[in-house]
Image: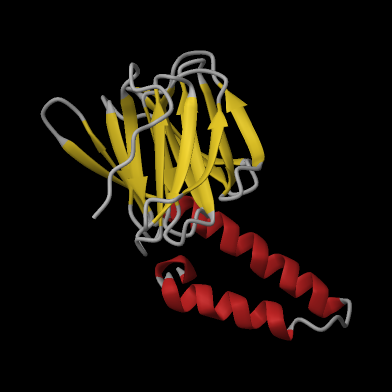
């Protein structure tokens, strides 16, 4: 359908991601550049990065992007190329991924440490697998799958979701005691409990 040649063909393309709706293509190179294309192959923007782009990820509709550079830094931004937040780690992370809605970002800080961040850049959860040089998030965000040399393991976000729902419930109860209108908040909470019924327990 189309092909494109990047600004410096002497450097390899390290990573390519396509939004699940097929509208946007995100590519990162050893030339320390990030590119966003539309489905017709037209370049929307090109951005010089702080170092080689090792991995990228993109939300289902292309509204949010993430990329990992070789100077141990992860960047989270929007499709206009504006960066919302960044994190620099003590050692080079090995993989990144995000949910389809970009509500959660997972970063394999090492083969034995995985950390999850919210869309706002706040650390919300983490775990230490035996060995996880590769990882991926479920599209809905409820699980993280990591792969080692001889196994694949599935981790659930349920403990974090339970804590979050308990906190939300307490905030709604407090608002009710202060005679505040909690109709909308209660509606959203009920929707979440319908989607994740187990945290009721």
Point out the residue furthest to the left here. 150
- Expressed as whole percent of the image width and height from the top left, the position of residue 105 reads 48, 44
Please give left or right for residue 148 compared with residue 67 in the image. Answer: left
196 shown above or below 150: below
- Expressed as whole percent of the image width and height from the top left, the position of residue 162 reads 51, 59
Point out the residue furthest to the right here. 178
10 shown above or below 18: above
Residue displayed at 65% across by 69% down: 169
Please give left or right for residue 49 compared with residue 38 in the image. Answer: right
Give the position of the N terminus as an image quadrant.
Answer: bottom left
- Expressed as whole percent of the image width and height from the top left, the position of residue 73 reads 54, 23
Residue 97 at least partly seen = no
Please give left or right for residue 54 compared with residue 119 in the image. Answer: left
Residue 26 at least partly seen = yes
Picture quadrant of residue 112: top left
Picture quadrant of residue 135: top left
Picture quadrant of residue 114: top left
Residue displayed at 33% across by 27% down: 14
Residue displayed at 50% across by 40% down: 66
Colouring scheme, one of rainbow, by chain, secondary structure, one colour: secondary structure
Query: Between 177 and 87, which is closer to the camera in this rendering?
Result: 87
Label count reads 0
- Expressed as whole percent of the image width and height from the top left, the position of residue 200 reads 48, 71
Query: Between 108 and 194, which is closer to the camera in this rendering?
Result: 108
Residue displayed at 34% across by 61% down: 22
Give the position of the C terminus as an image quadrant.
Answer: bottom left
Query: Between 136 and 125, which is closer to the camera in this rendering?
Result: 136
């Amino acid at each position: 359908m189309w092909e494109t040649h990047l600004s410096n063909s002497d450097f390899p393309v390290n990573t390519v991601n396509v939004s699940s709706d097929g509208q946007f293509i995100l590519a990162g190179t050893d030339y320390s550049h990030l590119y966003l294309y539309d489905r017709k192959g037209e370049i929307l923007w090109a951005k010089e990065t702080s170092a080689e782009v090792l991995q990228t990820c993109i939300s289902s509709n292309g509204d949010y992007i993430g990329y990992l550079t070789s100077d141990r830094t992860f960047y989270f931004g929007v499709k206009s190329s504006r960066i919302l937040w960044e994190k620099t780690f003590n050692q080079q992370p090995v993989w990144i991924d995000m949910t389809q809605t970009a509500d959660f970002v997972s970063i394999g800080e090492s083969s034995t440490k995985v950390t999850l961040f919210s869309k706002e850049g706040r650390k919300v959860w983490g775990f230490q697998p035996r060995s996880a040089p590769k990882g991926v998030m479920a599209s809905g965000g409820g699980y993280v799958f990591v792969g080692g040399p001889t196994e694949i393991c599935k981790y659930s976000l349920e403990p974090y979701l339970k804590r979050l729902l308990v906190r939300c419930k307490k905030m709604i109860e407090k608002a009710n005691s202060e005679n505040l209108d909690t109709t909308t908040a209660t509606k959203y909470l009920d929707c979440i409990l319908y989607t994740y019924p187990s945290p009721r327990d």
